[in-house]
Amino acid sequence: MSNDIAYPVFCSPDPVLALSMARRLMMFGHCEDSNVSLYGELRSVDEVLRGAKELPEGWFRGQERYGEFDDRVPFEDRPAWLVGVRGAGLPTDPTAYEGRLPVEYELLDQPVGSLEHVFTAAIGPSVGEINWHDLCWPDAPEVGFHGESKHAEVTLLLNTSTRQYDEPADHHTVLVHVRSVNIDGRQRGEPYAHWIAGQVGLTVIGPGQRF
């Protein structure tokens, strides 16, 4: 079993510019099977309702209150939108969201180029990410690396600096993913990340992140 490590290669307060840079990097590794997945944590009722209108295809899930259900209560007996519903199934009454925020959003395995601009606009000040996966990084013989597909990804973090969403930010960060190979405390794949970023005029600007 192997894992990835993701290096920041671009950061900007402009989400449109950050998306453009992420797409430039993604296109360097784009292949026939590439897809994009969207994730978000919508932190206000207005943002949830806007997301339901503009991104209805995804799944929305509210938070359960601590101790609200025990393991004996099956999922099908819990309120549907706490388990996961499409946008049309969300409550419209703002009081329904008391103690339920943030609402998680997820839309997986979509065609590249289909919803990235819509998601970037709809996320507003909430935290989220766009993840392009199933990419194909090419061989880089000059730095001693064969091509990579299993861990070839690009992520655009929106309004956060980390993959864990635990550091809200007023900027947006592009990450390039490579295979994590730690030898004597050093990441063997880091030069590959530098090489990939350099092919599109970017550079690694910070330490790698694991999820």
Image (spheres, helix red, strand yellow):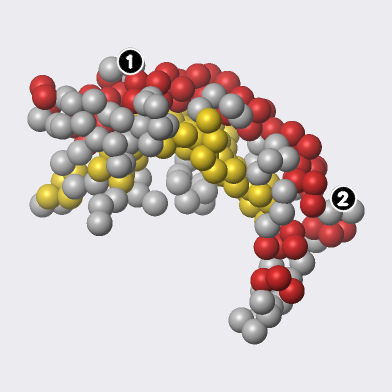
Task: Name the disc covering residue 92, or none.
Answer: 2
Q: Residue 119: x percent and y percent?
A: 63, 32
Residue 64 appears left or right of 32: right
Between residue 102 and residue 171, name the one nearer to us.
102
Whether residues under marks 2 and 1 lie with C-beta atoms below 8 angstroms apart, the answer is: no
Q: Is residue 205 visible?
A: no
Residue 23 appears left or right of 144: right
Q: Residue 174: x percent and y percent?
A: 43, 31
CA neighbours of label 2 inside 10 A, class few (<14), some (14 to 19), many (20+): few
Q: Quadrant of residue 40?
A: top right
Residue type beneath disc 2:
Thr
Task: Name the disc covering residue 7, or none.
Answer: none
Residue 17 appears left or right of 149: right
Residue type beneath disc 1:
Gly
The residue shown at (31%, 41%) is 151
Q: Dot 2: what SS?
A: loop
Q: Is residue 72 visible?
A: yes
Query: Which quadrant is home to the N terminus?
Result: bottom left
Task: Name the disc covering residue 201, or none.
Answer: 1
